[in-house]
Amino acid sequence: MLFTIINGLATGMAVFLVAAGLTLIFGILKILNFAHGAFFMIGAYVAFMIVGSNPPSLWLFLLASVAAGLVVGALGFITDRTVLRRLRDVDEAYMLIATFAVLLICEGAVKLIWGVNYASINPPPLLDDAIIVGSLFIPTYSAFLIGFGVLVYVALDLAIHRTWLGKLLQAISNDSWMTGLLGVNVPVALTLSVVASFMLAGLAGGILLPNQTLSPVLGGSYLLLAFIAVIIGGLGDIRGAFIASALLGVIESASSVLLPNIPGLATYVFVVVFLLVKPQGLFGSAST
């Protein structure tokens, strides 16, 4: 039972690493970015180019993940300047269509650059072993995911609620017009939030590289659960996304043990029941 919970928490933190960027961009710009999974996939490919199928060291693996975040952040800046910024004042449906189009473009570009072959990646040294406590067997990579997910959550929570820039972005989210009247360059601040969101997607792609099979359709593997976590947590709430991700991971892990023939069913039943009872999410207000 304890192994199931630990495995579920590792899965949940993997989901949160993807959901974090989605939560950030929705919390500030109110955008559900359908292309988020594609940039997660690009981050994985960038990291793979650096470390290959067998990462030679943990430090190189971490540096490759950071590099993936920086590359995808740069792509986020380009995407914001060419697509997102131009559509901020139009109907939300146009933004959804635009981000879906960006998703298709990214998938096509990945197939053109890297091909359609699949690749498996092993965990780097120090993360390819296991922690054994009595009869409990914990893969070190799973323990790493849990720790890294918590670290990312704490860093984001502090950045959003304790720093000047985080408070500024919250003010823009609440009333961008009034914030602009106070002399704040709102477009630049919004671009920074977009870049940060994309960087988180790229970082997640690198960190989760050993946890998946690399392919041009990789983005969808975590995106659905990440969207669910964002909705259950309360749209735009980083704490809610963190708790919801952990909860979904444990439910996924438990259902794979208890209901091995119908994987995922328990998760979707939980989502439907939860949203019927609390449609605003864990920490959303009743008016949202």
Image (tube, rainbow, N blue to C red):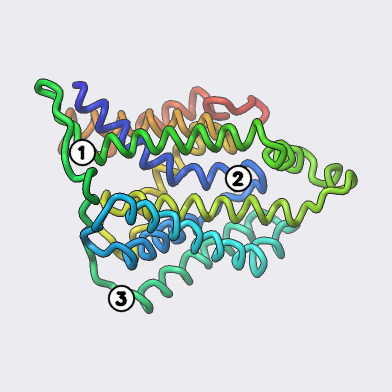
Amino acid type at circle 1 is Ile
Judged from this view, the residue extending furthest toward the left is 135
Query: Where is mark 2, residue-wise?
Result: 26
Quadrant occupied by the C terminus: top right
Residue 10 position, x and y percent, is 31, 35
Viewer-nearest residue: 253 or 39 = 39
Image point (22%, 44%), residue name: 126
What whole-number distance in Å separates the C-alpha atoms at marks 1 and 2?
32 Å
Residue 187 position, x and y percent, is 75, 56
Image point (76%, 38%), residue name: 171
Work out whether 68 lies above or below 162: below
Relative placement, left or right, of 138 versus 238 is left
Quadrant occupied by the N terminus: top left
The quarter of the picture where residue 287 lies is: top right
Q: Secondary structure at mark 3?
A: loop
Residue 212 position, x and y percent, is 27, 53
Neighbour tally class for label 3: few under 14, some 14-19, many 20 plus, Cα within 10 Å: few
- Which label is found at residue 51? none
Relative placement, left or right, of 73 versus 224 is right
- Which label is found at residue 262? 1
Residue 227 position, x and y percent, is 46, 44
Relative placement, left or right, of 191 versus 266 is right
Camera-near label (3 vs 1) is 3
Name the N-terminal-most of marks 1 and 2. Answer: 2
Neighbour tally class for label 1: few under 14, some 14-19, many 20 plus, Cα within 10 Å: few
Image point (34%, 65%), residue name: 50
How many numbered callouts? Answer: 3
Name the N-terminal-most of marks 2 and 3. Answer: 2
Amino acid type at circle 3 is Gly
Work out whether 7 lies above or below 71: above
Amino acid type at circle 2 is Phe
Query: Where is mark 3, residue-wise?
Result: 115
